[in-house]
């Protein structure tokens, strides 16, 4: 039923991912040929947007989610390689998502989802801020900012979606923690990719 939105979203995702790879390459402090290659970002973004296009169809949320996740792919790659989430990407991601959802509130004459999204944004950011204080060195300011983005986007649909995202992200982090990694068992786990993967999965599940 939503085949053509999926195809359009995948095509747009391929282009956006290729462009986003330029951003990845510029922001990476260490040379990582595969991580900054144009095809990696293009393929990941195309796949993510194809799934969302298939699930969401032509609803206005698709454009907003596509914007957030197109920036989310470079963030995930950078965090995976260097364990940091640059504010120069997170802040536009948050502002763009907020403006887009605000526009949907006006267009639909329904402020309730927008208000819930703002509260969810504050709740998710507050939760990760508490974690940052309690778990020294485990959660950084970038994770708090990205949590705000995740709260905003998933809170638009409902509190259950936010809770599900955090559960999925925590499960993914636990799996990564248990998997032997280069550098030994004490290697830190990047939360950014876990949060983004949890959000993507929840958006795909709930449509």
Image (cartoon, grey):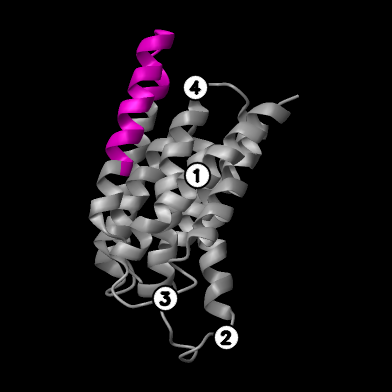
The one nearer the camera, 199 or 125, is 199
In the image, which is nearer the foreground, mark 1 or mark 4? 1
Label 2, label 3: how many angstroms apart (C-alpha)? 21 Å
Q: Nearer the viewer, mark 1 or mark 2?
A: 1
Callout 4 environment at 10 Å: few (<14), some (14 to 19), or many (20+)? some
Q: Is residue 21 above or below residue 100?
A: below
| Residue toward you, 51 or 137 | 51
Rendered residue at 40%/42% (across/down)? 151
Count the numbered circles shown: 4
Q: Judge from the rendering whether residue 72 lies leftward or rightward of residue 203; answer left or right.
A: left
Q: Residue furthest right?
A: 1
N-terminal of the pair, mark 1 or mark 4, is 1
Q: Which residues are magenta?
A: 93-115
Residue 114 part of the magenta segment = yes
Name the residue rendered at 54%, 70% in the picture.
174
Label disc, if present, on residue 32 of the rendered structure: 3
Q: Which mark is residue 180?
A: 2
Q: Vertical placement of 12 versus 136: above or below?
A: above
């Amino acid at each position: 039923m939503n085949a053509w939105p999926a195809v359009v979203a995948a095509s747009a995702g391929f282009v956006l991912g290729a462009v986003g790879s330029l951003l990845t390459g510029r922001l990476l402090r260490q040379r990582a040929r595969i991580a900054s290659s144009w095809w990696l970002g293009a393929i990941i973004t195309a796949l993510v947007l194809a799934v969302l296009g298939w699930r969401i169809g032509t609803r206005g949320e698709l454009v907003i989610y596509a914007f957030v996740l197109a920036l989310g792919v470079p963030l995930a790659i950078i965090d995976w390689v260097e364990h940091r989430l640059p504010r120069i990407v997170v802040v536009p991601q948050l502002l763009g998502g907020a403006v887009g959802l605000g526009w949907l509130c006006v267009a639909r004459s329904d402020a309730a989802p927008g208000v819930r999204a703002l509260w969810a944004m504050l709740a998710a950011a507050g939760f990760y801020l508490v974690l940052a204080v309690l778990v020294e060195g485990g959660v950084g300011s970038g994770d708090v900012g990205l949590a705000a983005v995740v709260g905003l986007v998933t809170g638009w649909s409902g509190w259950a979606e936010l809770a599900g995202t955090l559960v999925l992200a925590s499960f993914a982090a636990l799996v990564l923690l248990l998997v032997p990694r280069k550098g030994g068992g004490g290697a830190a786990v990047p939360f950014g990719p876990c949060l983004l993967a949890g959000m993507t999965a929840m958006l795909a599940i709930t449509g």
